[in-house]
Amino acid sequence: MTIRIATRRSPLAKWQANHVADRLRTNEPGVDVKLHELVTRGDRILEVPLAQVGGKGLFVKEIEDALLAKDAEIAVHSMKDLPALLAEGLVLAAVPEREDPRDALCSPKHKTLAALPKGAKVGTSSLRRGAQLKALRPDLQIEVIRGNVETRLRKASEGLDAVVLAYAGLRRLGLGAHATYVFPPEEMLPAVAQGALALEARADDAATLKRLARLEDPATRIRVEAERGFLARIEGGCQVPIAGHATLEDGEVVMRALVASLDGTRVIRGERRGSHADARKLGVAVAEELLSKGADEILRETEGKGTALSAPKR
């Protein structure tokens, strides 16, 4: 039997898919695992910010379509790309152990955020990172950068003073040394499910679901459930700077989240703790807390604005 894994063609996406393939081969020596590589809408649209073309789901639809068409048995995604609601007929079959969820500054010349000169140009494709950077350093010029990890790293020394990327992606590609400063979550709250992988399968494919169950990491699943509960309640279809990060502390889930204005001048934060069994409800409760503090106003104001970041550089 051949197991086909649907994946994007980027180096990071293929690393993730190959990592899952290796885990499957370890569990079942001799099993035939192949990658089914696809180009998603998010991969094709490189000249405009993600938020202006739909944000969540841009890197997912074509891969989910391959599953539903039975061109593949498994889909491997970066969990943070996965919308709060999956396509009908598909399930989140397994959540493997999470990589470091923090964000990393890459600046060959200046090294740290504090060392960046006044008015420094910092590249990111994320409204969340841009807003939190502006909140920390209002003087910074935030510019949109697109492309794979290696392309964005090059831009840190080609016209920009620094770029900010997910530390998990750098580590997975063996590029962790390019991170000159790693933001603690207290300084820059990570994206929902950043550093986690999503293994998706058809709900009626019992054999694949059983196979993937062996790759599940319960602790990561609990954290992701809290974060995605927050996402499902707060997002509302808007493309806005939101962040959600759950940890397991003293036998409880601690969920921290924020909603920010595009320019970082308003940042509304919330925190709750509760039982592992109520992780998803906890995420929803934090979302409700933020909405009660005025996050709904930011959501309404931001809808339709797209992005406050500068246009991407050709």
Image (spheres, helix red, strand yellow):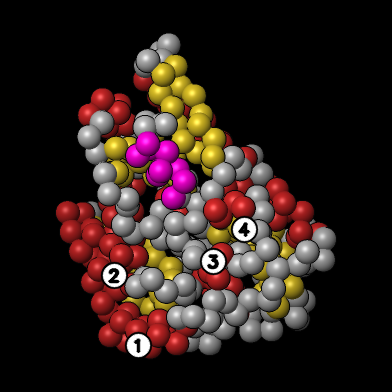
Q: Which residue is mark 2?
A: 233
Q: Which residue is mark 3?
A: 53
Residue type pointed to by label 3: Val
Tell me whether circle 1 and circle 3 mark residues in contact (CB < 8 Å). no
Residue at 23% x, 58% y is 279
Residue at 65% x, 59% y is 46
User: Is residue 262 shown left or right of residue 231?
Assistant: right
As helix, strand or loop, the secondary structure at mark 3 comes to: loop
Residue type pointed to by label 4: Ile
Labels 1 and 3: the sequence-earlier one: 3
Name the main secondary structure of what is drawn in magenta: helix
Labels 2 and 1: the sequence-earlier one: 2
Bin the neighbour count of mark 3 within 10 Å (Cα to Cα): few under 14, some 14-19, many 20 and up.
Answer: some
Q: Quadrant of residue 306?
A: bottom right
Residue 15: give its label: none
The residues colored magenta run 61-69
Q: Which residue is mark 1?
A: 294
Tell me whether circle 3 and circle 4 mark residues in contact (CB < 8 Å). yes
